[in-house]
Amino acid sequence: KYSAAKSAFEELVQKYPYGQYAPNGYYWLGEIHMTQHNLAQAEEAFRPVVEKFPSHSKAPDALLKLGVLALDKKS
């Protein structure tokens, strides 16, 4: 049910872009986009986790995903 999850996470980050659950919302949006091979959108979703919430527990994971996406671009 990626479509329903994607819609829910998009709504979450739009309504509460700096809320306590926003980093998880952005992160899981990135995961959904990666799963669906929407790599540019995945990057757009992971980036706020690293930039807006650098001390959040998902920040290292999001940074890793951004690295994976960067490698994919070079291939």
Image (spheres, helix red, strand yellow):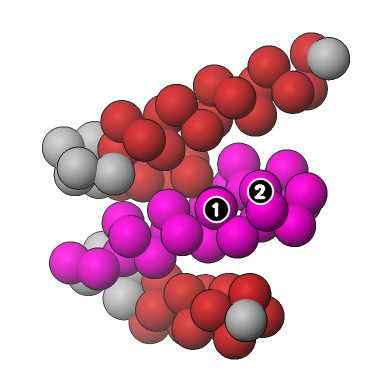
Magenta residue span: 20-45
Q: Is residue 59 above or below residue 19?
A: above
**Which residue is disc 1 drawn over?**
31
Q: CA distance from mark 2 to mark 1?
A: 5 Å
**Circle 2 SS class:** helix
Question: Is 68 left or right of 53, judged from the image as shown?
Answer: right
Specify the quadrant that holds the N terminus.
bottom right
> Which residue sits at x=47%, y=75%?
9
User: How far from the left and from the top, in percent, is residue 55?
Assistant: 16, 37
**Residue under the point 78% across and 22% down:** 73
Instruction: State whether residue 44 is above or below residue 72.
Output: below
Q: Nearer the viewer, residue 23 or 3?
A: 3
Kindly indicate the quadrant of the structure image that contains residue 43: top right
Whether 44 is drawn above or below 68: the answer is below
The residue that disc 2 covers is 34
The answer to whether mark 2 and mark 1 are in CB contact below 8 A is: yes
For the residue marked with disc 1, what is the amino acid?
Answer: Glu
User: Can you name the residue that lies furthest to the right here?
Assistant: 75
- Is residue 51 visible in the rendered image? The answer is no
| Dot 2 crowding, Cα within 10 Å, few <14, some 14–19, many 20+ | some
Q: Is residue 20 left or right of residue 30?
A: left
Q: Amino acid at mark 2?
A: Met
Residue 57, magenta (yes or no): no
Is residue 34 rendered to the left or right of residue 19? right
